[in-house]
Image: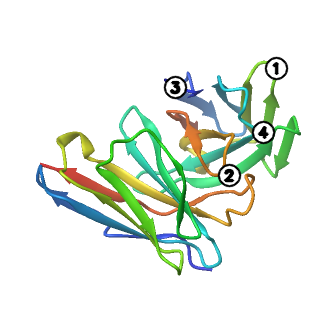
């Protein structure tokens, strides 16, 4: 089985711009979660989608949004970029039917905001 | 507020010896715990999990122990190998796929 893929792998934007990141889960996985990783902060949960519905949300401002398509692929959008949004954005997929499913991560998208 | 903490940012161990990585959590509603390994420029790789109905889970060289009363879990790697050198994250959840991660422990296994 192919793993979780994320595109693009690297992105450079300037303050005020918006960005869209894409995540394709493992085939058969219906849950996609997004995380932000910054140095010293570990991984911070952004949100999780299951069957095209946002099922869980972390404590991030409304500038961070996402969606999931019928094929389980997910996109994350960040509007009005700030310098502090520079981070590694990771998505993870899982079966999602129960609370006890392992999450499998993609390689991440490295976003740099100038 | 950090609900999952890994208080040791780094750990150095000799090849062949045991590596013990620790993790503490504050939320008693957490009932599912995972350990991940992460190499630079890659996403975290799932290692092992444990649910709150167990206190131990083994998978080859990796064993996770859960002490619910102390809100503490640990990952034991025996024997440690140089290829185990990476950053290890613990994660906890009490809700569907809403995981809280620790800040990671960098393990260095010396040949």
In the figure, is residue A44 to the left or right of B69?
left
Q: Nearer the viewer, residue B76 or A18?
A: A18
**Separation of residues labelled 3 and 4 (CA atoms):** 21 Å
Q: Nearer the viewer, mark 2 or mark 3?
A: 3
**Separation of residues labelled 1 and 2 (CA atoms):** 24 Å
Residue at the (25%, 46%) spot, across then down = A86
Q: Nearer the viewer, mark 4 or mark 1?
A: 1
In the figure, is residue B110 to the left or right of B15?
left
**Separation of residues labelled 2 and 3 (CA atoms):** 22 Å
Are the residues under badges 4 and 1 in a single subunit? yes
Residue at the (81%, 51%) spot, across then down = B59
Q: Secondary structure at mark 1?
A: loop
The tag earlier along the polypeptide, 3 or 4, is 3
Check the residue under mark 3 and report the chain it is in. Answer: B
The tag earlier along the polypeptide, 4 or 1, is 4
Q: Are marks 4 and 2 in contact (CB under 8 Å)?
A: no
Q: Nearer the viewer, residue B38 or A91?
A: A91
Q: Is residue A94 above or below residue B4?
A: below
Q: Nearer the viewer, residue A110 or A24?
A: A24
The tag earlier along the polypeptide, 1 or 3, is 3
Q: Label 2: which residue? A: B47
Labelled disc at residue B64? 4
Q: Secondary structure at mark 4?
A: strand
Residue B92 drawn at (x, y percent)? 65, 39
Check the residue under mark 4 and report the chain it is in. Answer: B
Q: Are marks 2 and 3 in contact (CB under 8 Å)?
A: no
Check the residue under mark 1 and report the chain it is in. Answer: B
The tag earlier along the polypeptide, 2 or 3, is 3
Crowding around mark 3 (Cα neighbors within 10 Å: few <14, some 14 to 19, many 20+) is few
Q: Is residue A11 visible?
A: yes
Labelled disc at residue B2? 3
Are the residues under badges 2 and 3 in a single subunit? yes
């Amino acid at each position: 089985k192919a793993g979780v893929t994320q595109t693009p792998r690297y992105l450079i934007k300037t303050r005020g711009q918006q960005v869209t990141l894409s995540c394709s889960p493992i085939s058969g996985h219906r849950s996609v979660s997004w995380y932000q990783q910054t140095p010293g902060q570990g991984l911070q949960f952004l949100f999780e989608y299951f069957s095209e519905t946002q099922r869980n949300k972390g404590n991030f401002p409304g500038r961070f949004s996402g969606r999931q398509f019928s094929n389980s692929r997910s996109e994350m959008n960040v509007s009005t970029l700030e310098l502090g949004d520079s981070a590694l954005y990771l998505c993870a997929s899982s079966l999602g039917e129960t609370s006890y499913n392992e999450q499998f991560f993609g390689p991440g998208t490295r976003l740099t905001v100038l | 507020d950090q609900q999952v903490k890994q208080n040791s940012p780094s750990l150095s161990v000799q090849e062949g010896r045991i590596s013990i990585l620790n993790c503490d959590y504050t939320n008693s509603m957490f009932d599912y715990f995972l350990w991940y390994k992460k190499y630079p420029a890659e996403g975290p790789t799932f290692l092992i999990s444990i649910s709150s109905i167990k206190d131990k889970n083994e998978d080859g060289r990796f064993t996770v122990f859960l002490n619910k009363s102390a809100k503490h879990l640990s990952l034991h790697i025996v024997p440690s190998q140089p290829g185990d050198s990476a950053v290890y994250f613990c994660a906890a959840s009490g809700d569907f796929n809403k995981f809280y991660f620790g800040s990671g422990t960098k393990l260095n296994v010396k040949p």
